[in-house]
Amino acid sequence: MLSRHPAHDLIPPVALGGNKLVRVALDGMALRRQGRGVTRVLQQVFPLLVADPRLDCIILSTREGREMLDLGSSVCFHEVPQTTQSAWEQFGLPWHARQVRADAIYSFAECGPLWGPPLLLHIPEDPFIRWQGINADSLRERVRRGYQRTTIRRGLHHASVLATCSSVCQSALRNRFGPDLSKIAIVPLGVDTELFHPNSAAIKDDGIFHLSSTEARDMSTVVVRAYAMALSLTPDLPDLLIAGELGGQRKRICDAARECGVDRRLHLLGRISDEALRQRYASAALCVQPSLYEGFGLQPLEALACGAPLVVFPEPTVEEVVGEAAIITRDRDETSLAECIARLWSDKSQRATLRENGRRRATFFSWVRTARLLADLLVEMGPSKRTN
């Protein structure tokens, strides 16, 4: 179902300064209320792309996605049914893009369709590295990975334009899939400083905060063990607060806390709202976000924007984002993490410096810049390759 303003029609876009607008089908299947990373990116980028005067955007999304964006009747939505990701990528997305006569598709995903209008594929991360932390112990997972290995390789070479979020991810993709890939542009993500900002009130030093998820790469059990070690070094350490939808991680976290004798100092907050997340970042004594791999490091960036004194693992992509505005552990283990936690808690002056440096660092990452870079790439693709 196409919901649109009367000015939109399934005809060639209107002229702007003698040039045709580029009609872009924006892939909004990932817009879900339970989403976090990808959903947040689309919520920030789509309104800015829609507002770009060079583009004629049509958002392909479910009714839930449309309600989440809430862009009003002047924006063109093409409502699609909810389906599996693989079916959407290879069938639904290109088919619906042709139905709306798009010049190009924009998709923030690891894999894109192998046919249809020209594609700008904005890749969040190298999935082959992410899979290293996830066990493929079921037939379903092995089949899924086999399918993705094939489609990802072919999809990267099929895409008209490739972009990714960091130079580290750019190098990883080139090394893995070959130098014959087309140019991979770097389009970093941003941070919403209207949502993520420091508290106006005095800092409360309210706990050691860690945002987790269902993925083992968040290293949440390592955080628990490191907290226990740091507590033995600095007994006045505040309690450990872990937020997020944990899934199977929850039992492992609780077991680790009991084994280390810190179960009474651990508080699992569950999934929290964006505003509650901002408050936790802004009021935390310090924030601990180790990760085995990130495509960009959006969560550390949001923590910096809120002024959280941040401790991270030496992960190249995260280091590219945080610069010198965070404490980077010596090694990727609980001993190094515990030492940094204890040292930072004991140094109030350094925490104050990190709060200021983090806020300043976050200003380098703007969603407006992200959208402008994407729009430039889409304009370069041009309306001349319209699919009939």
Image (cartoon, helix red, strand yellow):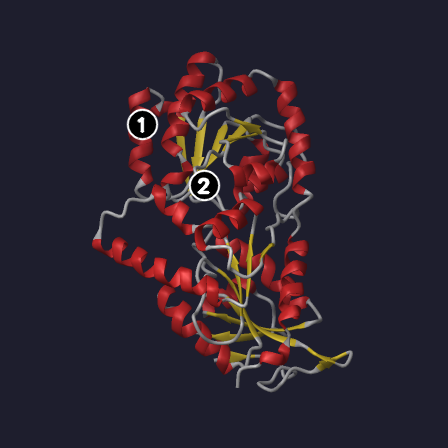
Name the residue that disc number 2 marks: 293
- Specify the label residue 35 is tagged with: none
Q: Nearer the viewer, mark 1 or mark 2?
A: 2
Front-lying residue, 117 or 236: 117
Image location (x, y in percent) of residue 197: 64, 41
Residue 180 visible at all: yes
Residue 81 visible at all: no
- Residue 22 sits above or below residue 224 on the image: below
Front-lying residue, 255 or 119: 119
Image location (x, y in percent) of residue 250: 32, 38
Residue at 39% x, 49% y is: 128
- Amino acid of disc 2: Tyr
SS at badge 2: loop
- Amino acid of disc 1: Ala
Name the residue that disc number 1 marks: 256
Residue at 26% x, 58% y is: 143
Using the rendered view, name the quadrant where residue 240 is placed.
Answer: top left
- Residue 214 sits above or below residue 75 on the image: above
Residue at 36% x, 31% y is: 221
- Residue 341 sits above or below residue 235 on the image: below
